[in-house]
Image (cartoon, grey):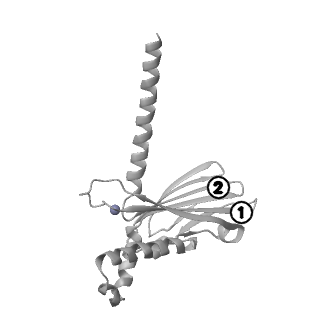
Amino acid sequence: MNRLIRSLALSISSNALAIHSAQAESRHAGAHVHGVNQLQIVQQGRELSVTFSLPTEQLRAVHEQHEEQDYDEHEHEHESASQSLAHEIGDRLKALREYQQLFSASEINTQCTLTNYHFELHSVVTGKDDPHAGHKDAILEYQFNCSDDLTLSAIEINAFKEFDDLERVDFEGLIGGVGVTASIVPDNPRVEL
Ligand SMILES: [Zn+2]
């Protein structure tokens, strides 16, 4: 009897682990697609949390455009060029604290204050021959404190103006407990809430 319970418990916990790791993998695989970014907005009372995810290669494309204009860069060794790239991507991510480069909403501009911004880099897990080996996703998190009567009417995606290669933003919102999902494209860079 004891042994049965023990083996049952073991089988339940290993299933839970399998489900958990499958979700983690699919979430990560879904996140890293060049040309596709994710925007998640959760509003609960005065608190507004926004998460924007993008592959860092998207920032690199901007870097390479700049590099074409800057001939001095080509004199550097390969390693210092890649260090300067990492440095420039870091600077670019810091500058994205100015969230209007990525998204905006008139109500956020007038009724909310940005109280915290931070970003993380997540390595894409692949084999070393995979074309995405060494690539990273940047996860940008914004916290806003808003007025009590905040009612978001629409979100504009400004990232399409910033990144020529961006083809789609997958939007997920949870606004006062109501879920909204949308696939946003450059022709109509806006989601109505
Ligand atoms: Zn990649």
Whether the residues at callouts 2 and 1 have beta carbons within 8 Å, the answer is yes
Q: Quadrant of ligand 1?
A: bottom left
Does the Cβ of the disc 2 residue fall within 8 Å of ligand 1? no
Q: Quadrant of the C terminus?
A: bottom right
Residue 146's tag is 1
* Residue drawn where x is 49% and y is 68% of the image: 189
In primary-sequence order, the first of circles 2 and 1 is: 2
| Kind of residue sitting beneath label 1 | Cys
Q: Say what secondary structure mark 2 lies in.
A: strand
Image location of residue 126, percent across then percent down: 31, 53
Image location of residue 180, percent across then percent down: 55, 52
Residue at far left of view? 129
Residue 193 visible here: no
Image quadrant of residue 47?
bottom right
Residue at far right of view? 148
Residue 106 versus residue 74 in the image, above or below: above
Image quadrant of residue 150?
bottom right
Residue 87 versus residue 13 in the image, above or below: below
